[in-house]
Image (cartoon, rainbow, N blue to C red):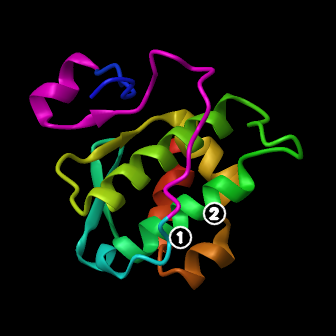
Amino acid sequence: MPGAEKHLQSPFADALGVRDLGRRDHPGESVGTSGSTEDSTFVLVEVVLLIGARPHCLTAEQARWLEDRIRSTCVDDMGRPPDSDALACLQLADVLAEDLDAGEHIKPIELGRSHAVGLTEYVLNVGAAAEHDMPAFYEALIRFRG
């Protein structure tokens, strides 16, 4: 697909069937939005995020909430990510949107330390994780970020 974003894979990611979000070919590129929060067909998709080697499943509703929350909390007043951890989260939001909009999730998404730091500093806290039934996901992020 022309203009499609490429993700660099770790040598282990292909062997494990995992998408590695650690780096992009164009780190300064703009980050889009899915724009389809009203789509009711996404409820059948389950998204698998790998934190370390441990999988964490999110329902489509949780993944869509996470995508929207990332887009609203990981940008400054000018609409730019304040640091590389926020940028990593915005890249994650792009991948979540792609999977949810496509109505399928084929490979688990491997999260790096930068994702864990960004998600715990900008996106999730104990209350939000509990409200959206994601406390185990939040706790895993806290442990992984160190």
Q: Residue at x 74, y 31 (%)?
A: 83
Q: Residue at x 59, y 38 (%)?
A: 31
Please give the range of residues in magenta.
10-35
Q: Quadrant of residue 76 in the image?
A: top right
Classify mark 2: residues with Cα within 10 Å, few (<14), some (14-19) or many (20+): some
Three-letter amino acid code at the position of disc 1:
Trp
Three-letter amino acid code at the position of disc 2:
Arg
Residue 66 location (% of width, % of height): 53, 63
Vertical position of residue 44 compared to residue 28: above or below: below
From the viewer's perspective, is 13 left or right of 130? left
Residue at mark 2: 69
Residue 41 in view (yes/no): yes
Residue 133 location (% of width, % of height): 47, 81
Residue at mark 1: 65
Q: Secondary structure under badge 1?
A: helix
Residue furthest out toward the front: 2
- Marks 1/2: CA–CA distance: 6 Å
Vertical position of residue 138 compared to residue 41: above or below: above
Quadrant for the C terminus, please: top right
